[in-house]
Amino acid sequence: MIAGRINLAKEIGQDLLRHKWQLLLTLVTLSSALLVIVITQGTRQLTSEYNELMAEQDRLDIEWRHLLLEQSTLMEHSRIEALARDKLDMQRPAPAQEKLVTQR
């Protein structure tokens, strides 16, 4: 009848040893595939962060331009002169009232 029982674990182990190069290549292929997945995900995250940073840079550039316009508007001589005249009751002195200060 049955000459002997076959040990399945032993047979699988012997089969794997006979085909060790194929097993090694399979493991290398699976490792490579997993590495591609990890690197692709990392690249997508970095691209997303880069796009967000570029959008933030654009917003900051626009804000900077608005602040420069506001600064130039606030620093106009005519505006400063009007504020001095209206709020501080200042006026330009007559040439006879001007005094020159010199450094010794």
Image: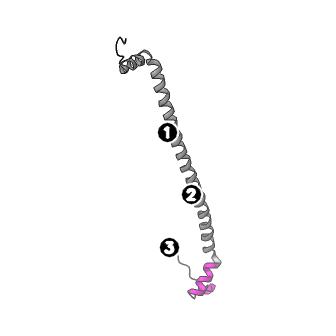
Pick out the residue farthest to the right.
78
Which mark's residue is nearer the viewer, 1 or 2? 1
- Lower position in the chain sequence, tag 1 or tag 2: 1
Can residue 94 be found in the magenta stretch?
yes
Q: Distance between the residues labelled 1 and 2?
A: 27 Å
Q: What stretch is highlighted in magenta?
A: 79-104
Question: Residue placed farthest to the bottom in the image?
Answer: 89
Q: Residues within 10 Å of mark 2 (few under 14, many from 20)?
A: few
x and y percent of residue 98 in the render? Answer: 59, 83
26 lies left or right of 14: right
Q: Is residue 92 above or below residue 33?
A: below
What residue is shown with label 1?
38
Tell me the kind of residue under disc 1.
Val
- Judging from the image, the colouring scheme is one colour
Within-10-Å neighbours for mark 1: few <14, some 14–19, many 20+: few
Q: Where is 25 relative to 37, above or below?
A: above
Which residue appears at 55% of the width and 44% of the height?
A: 44
Residue 40 placement (x, y as % from top left): 54, 40
Q: Kindly indicate the quadrant of the structure image that contains residue 9.
A: top left
- Residue sitting at x 63%, y 74%: 76
Q: How far apart are the alpha carbons under marks 1 and 3?
A: 72 Å
Q: Which of 63 and 34 is in front in this view?
A: 34
Give the crowd class for mark 3: few <14, some 14-19, many >=20 residues within 10 Å.
Answer: few
Q: How far apart are marks 2 and 3 (CA)?
A: 51 Å
* Label of residue 56 in the image: 2
Q: Is 100 inside the magenta-drawn segment? A: yes
Mark 3, residue position = 103
